[in-house]
Amino acid sequence: MSHEPKALGGRIFTRTFCICMFVVAIAGYFVVKRLIFGIGAVTNLNDGYPWGLWISYDVVVGTAFACGGYVMALLVYIMNRGEYHPLVRPALLASMFGYALAGVSVFLDIGRYLNVYNLYLPWQMNFHSVMFEVAMCIAAYIFVLWLEFTPAFVEKWGLKNFGKKLDKVIFAIIALGVLLPTMHQSSLGTMILMAGYKLDPLWHTTTLPLLFLLTAVFMGFAMVIFEATISSRVYELSDETSILSKIGHIMVYVLGFYLVVRFQNVFMRGYMSEAFSGSFLGNMFLLENLMLIIGLVILAYPNYRNSPRLLFIAATAILIGGSLYRFNTYMIGFDPGTGWKYFPSVGEQMITYGLIAFEIAMYTLFVKIFPVFSSHAPAESNN
Amino acid sequence: MKMKRRDFLKGAAGGLALLTLDSKVVDARTVEALPPNALGILYDSTLCVGCNACMASCKKANSMIPEMTGEQEIWDNPQDLSASTLNIIKKFSSGTGAHKDQEEDGYAFIKRQCLHCVDPSCVTACPVTALAKDNDTGIVTYDKNACIGCRYCQVACPYNIPKFEWDDPYPEIVKCELCSHLIAKGEISACCSVCPTGASLFGPVAELLNETRRRLQMKPGKLYKFPVYSIDSGKWHELNAPKYQQHVYGQDELGGTQVMYMAAVPFEKLGLPSFPKESFVSMASGIQYAIYKGMVYPLVVLAGLIFMANKNKKSNEEKQSTSTHDQGEDA
Amino acid sequence: MKNTEFDQDQEQVGGISRRDFIKFCSAVAAGLALPGAMTAKIAHAITNPNRPPVIWLHGSECTGCSMSLLRAEHPTLEKLMLELISLDFHETLSAGAGHQAEEALEQSVEANYGKFILIIEGAVPLKDGGIYCRVGGKNFVDIVRDIGPKAGAVIAVGSCASWGGVAAMAPNPTGCVGVSEVLKDQTVVSIPGCPPNPYNLLSTIIHYLTFNKLPALDSENRPKFAYGRLIHEHCERRPHFDNGRFARAFGDESHRQGHCLYYLGCKGPVTYANCSTSQFGDAGSGCWPVAIGHPCFGCAQKGVGFNVPQFTVSPVLHQTPAAGHAPIIVERGEGVSPGSAALMAGLGGVALGAGAVFAAKLDKGSKHEDEEA
C-alpha cells in the first residue's frame, strides 16, 4: 500500500466541475456589477447592517471551514501524531482555497480596495484595532498556507533543489501556520465584541475570543471528516474511517469543553431564560447548540463514531452548528436598533455561492493534478 | 496520549482563566481623556424649534446633495443621517403631540450628528487610522485616502453615526466633522452659526460643561439668559427656564462625548440610549492588549511551536532512517 | 440739517418736503442694506451740484424700464428722480429731438468724459453689422461701442440690456445680445427684470454717487443687494411650499387660499431677484405677481425668462428641508424578498438533500474497532 501522495489524474471537466464553473459564471456577472455600480447595486447591505452575508459567511464561517489545515498541522507536526498524516494535504488544499477566497471576498466587500496598501504603511497602522490584527494575520496565513502546500508543487514539478531548501525552513512555516490561525480566529471573536449592545446578550460576552477559537478547532476537524468521507467515496480511495473516528474522538473533548463554557457563560450572565423564551433569537441559540449536541452525542460513543454514516452525519451537524454560531454572532443576532432590517439579496448570495463553487472546482482540479491524496488502492471495499 | 491530556488541561486552565479575568483585562488599556482644547456643541432640545436651519446650512457648508424621499422631489427631507446628511433634526412625538417638551401628549426635537466621543469607538476600530481624533480639539476626522471601506467603524459606533456611500463604486464613509474646515478659518460650525434660538451652541467643551451645570440649576419658569451661536458670542436671548432632565447626555456615556445634549424629555425617547461609563471598545481593546501587547505572548508561543515542529521533524527523520515501517495504523 | 441749509437743498429738489426727502434717502439706504447713518451722506451726494450726470441710451427695447421708473405712486417723485440723478439725455423724455438732441448727447459726453453714468435700456442687435437698430443714422452697436468706453460707469437696465431679454428670444432674428457682450472690456452692471424694480436702478446709481464706486456685484455683475437671493428664498408663500400646500389649477381651493404656486410653473426657485421683498409700484405689499396669484415668470433670470415656458414646473435650485421632521426610528432596509428567500431555501434544500442521499449510501455498521480511549 502506497502512502506517498499521488495525483489522481483523470478527466478534469467532470459534471461537478462544469456545474461549479457555471455557478462561478453567474457570480462573475454580479462581481462585475458590483465593481462598476457599487456595493449597493448588488447587495442589501445598509447603514444598519454594514456587514452581511459576505463578511459572515465568506470570512467568518468560511475561514472556520478552512481550519482543517490548521488543526491537522497542529495534530501532526506539533503534537507529532503521524498516523493522521494522510489527512494533512487534503485538509491543506481545502484551507488554502478557503482562505484565499475569503481574501477575494474581502477585496470585493471593502469599498475602497485600492487603498488596501494603507494596512502596510507603518504610520497608518492602528495597533489598537482588532480588525488590523485579523487582516494582517489572515493575509499572512494565506501566504503561509500556499507555502505549506509547496511540497506538493515540488513533487509534481520535480523542483529538487528548491525542495531541499524548503525542507530546511518548512518547520518554521508550519509553526507560523499554527500560530496565525490561533491568533486571528480568536480575534474574530474579539472583533464582534466591539459591537457592544448591538449583539444580542446570548452571544455577547468577553469569552467570545475563546469560543471562536474552539469553534475554529472543532469545525476544522469536522471539515476534515466531512471532506475526507466525501472524497474517499467520490474518488474511490481507501476507507479512512478508523483515523477519522479517532479525530472524532478528539473532537469530543474540544466540543464538550466548548459546550460547558458556552452554557455556563450564558447561565452565569442570566440569559438562560431568554434562550428558552421561544423568541426568534432564543430559538437560534437552541438550534445552534442542538446541532452541536447531536454531533457530540454521536461522537461520544465508539460504536457510533466508527460508523461512516453516523460519523459523517455528526461532522455535518457540527459544521451546521458551528457555522450557525458564527452567523448568529455576526449577522442574525446583530441589530443596531434603529429600525433597519437586512436579508442577503440574490446578487450577494450568488457571489458567495460562486466563491464556494470555485473552491470546489479548484479542489477537484488540484487533486487530479497535484499529489494530494495518499491512499489510492481501494483496500477493503465498503460498498 | 500524555501530550493530549496535558494540552487539554492547559487549554481548560487557560479558558477558565479567561472567564475569570473578565474585569482585570479592562484595565489593561488606558482610557482616553478629554483633549486640552476640546471643542464641542451643546444641544438643548428645549430651545430647539425645529426650523431645520442647521440642516440647510450643514448641507451647504459641506457641499452635500439634497436627499429627496417621498413622492415630491422638491425638498431635502432625509429620514436619518446618511451619506449626504451629516446632521438631522428628528422629532419625538407621543399621544396628541400637542405640548412641546412634554413626555406625554407632547413632542420634542433632537439633533443627531457625530458626538465626537472622548474615547471614539470608530477611531479604535479603524485598522488604517482613517478615522482619527485630533489631539488638540478632539474633533474626529475622516481621511478618505487611508480608508479601505471595511465599515468596521459602522459596526463599532454605539450611536450608529458613520454612514457609507452604498451607491458609489468607490465609496467613502461620511459623518459630521464639526466643520473643522470652518474652524480652521476661525469660524464656528455651520449648524451653530445659523441656529436662531441657541439650541446648538458651539464652544470649548469645558465651558459648555459649565453652561450645563448652570442650566441644571435653573429654577423652571424663571427668566435667564441663554447664549446663541457660541458660548462667547456675547449674544443671548432671555427666556424662561424649562424643567430639564437632571442629566447631561454625553457627560459620562461611554467615556463622554464632546457633543452633549440637554432635554426635558427622557433621552431614550429621543433615540439616545443609556450607556455605561466604560466604552465597549475599551473592553474589547483591553482583551487585545492583554494578549497581544508587545507581541510577547504570540512570540513565545511561536518559539514553542517552532521548537516542537523542529523536534518532531528531527525525530521523524531519525525514525525513518532506522526503520522502514510507516507510522500509524491505517485501514 | 440746519434750516438754512435745507432751504437751499429744497430748491434743488423741486419743492419736496424735507420729511419726504429724508424718507426717500433712508429708503434708498435700507434698500442698499446700508446703516441708517448713511442717510445723511446719501442726501449730500444727491444734492451735490457737482454730481455727474446720467446719460440714458435706448436700443432694442420697449421702454418699459423707463416706464417703471416713472410709475411710482408719488407723482411728485417723477421729477424728483429725474432731477436727482441729473438725467442729461433720455430719448423718450428729452425735450429736444433730432439733430438737436444728438448734439446735446455729444456735448454731454465730451464735457463729462470718464465721469458720467451711462444707462443702457434694451438689447443690442448684432446681425448684419447691427443694422436692425439705428438711431440718428448710426447702428446702435456702434453707438454703444463709441460712448461706452467714455463712461465712468455703465449700467444695463432691464433684462434686454442685461442678457438679451425678450428681444433675444428664440429664434432671435436680429442677433440681439446684452450690453456686456458688446462692452467686453468694461464692467457692465446688470439690473435685470422685465421691468426691474426702479429702486434697484436708483439705489445703484445713488451708491455710485455717494461712494464713487459701484455696490458689490455677483458673478453676473448684478448688484448683490437686489439679486443676491432667489425669489424662492424670501417669498411670502414659502411656508406653504415647505408644508406641501400647493395650488394645482387657477381658481381651485388652494389657489383661493393663497397657497404656493410651484406647480403652476412658478420660477421663483430658479430666479435671482428681490421682487418678493421690494415689490412694484411703490404701493406697499401685495404688488408683485405671486402675491396676486400668478406664478413668477423668471423675467430677470437669463435662461429662465422668455425661454422656459410659463407653466413648466421648474427645478428647485437650493433644496432645503421641508417643514416636517423625521421620527426618531424609521423602518427601512431590504428584508426578505421572494427571490432571495427562494434562492437560499432552494440551494440549501439541494445541499441538504444531496447530503442525505450521500449519507444514506454510506456504510452504517462499524467493522472497525476503535481501541483508543
Image (cartoon, helix red, strand yellow):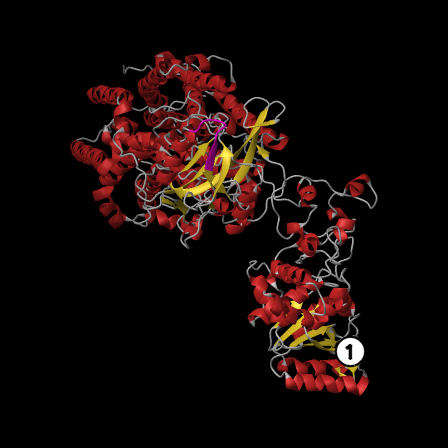
Give B204 or B267, whichever is nearer the viewer.
B204
Q: Which residues are magenta?
A: B218-225
Q: Residue furthest right?
A: C251
Q: Does the segment drawn in magenta span residue A327?
A: no
Name the spot of residue A336 as percent of width and height, x first. Answer: 48, 30
In which quadrant will I find the C terminus of chain A? top left
Establish if C243 lies above or below B3. below
Q: Is residue A86 visible?
A: no
Residue A309 rendering spot, x and y as whole percentages: 44, 18
Q: How many marks?
A: 1
Q: Which residue is mark 1?
A: C94
Asked whether, in this view, residue C198 is left or right of residue A191, the answer is: right
Relative depth, front residue between A174 and C280: C280
**What residue is at 31 percent from the left and 35 percent from the top?**
A4
Where is residue C204 drawn, in percent x and y? 63, 67
Q: Quadrant of residue A206?
A: top left
Horizontal side, residue C372 vs residue B88: left or right: left
Under circle 1, the secondary element is loop
Left or right of residue B4, residue B50 in this image: right
Say which of C34 and B122 sits in front: C34
Q: Residues within 10 Å of mark 1 (few under 14, many from 20)?
A: few
Mark 1: amino acid: Ser
Q: Main secondary structure of the magenta part?
A: loop
Q: Residue at x 27, y 14 (%)?
A: C373
Residue sitting at the far front: C4
Q: Where does the N terminus of chain A fall, quadrant-wise?
A: top left
The quadrant in which residue C227 appears is: bottom right
Q: Please state the horizontal and vertical placement of residue C295, each as a whole percent of the image.
A: 76, 51
Closer to us: C51 or C146: C51
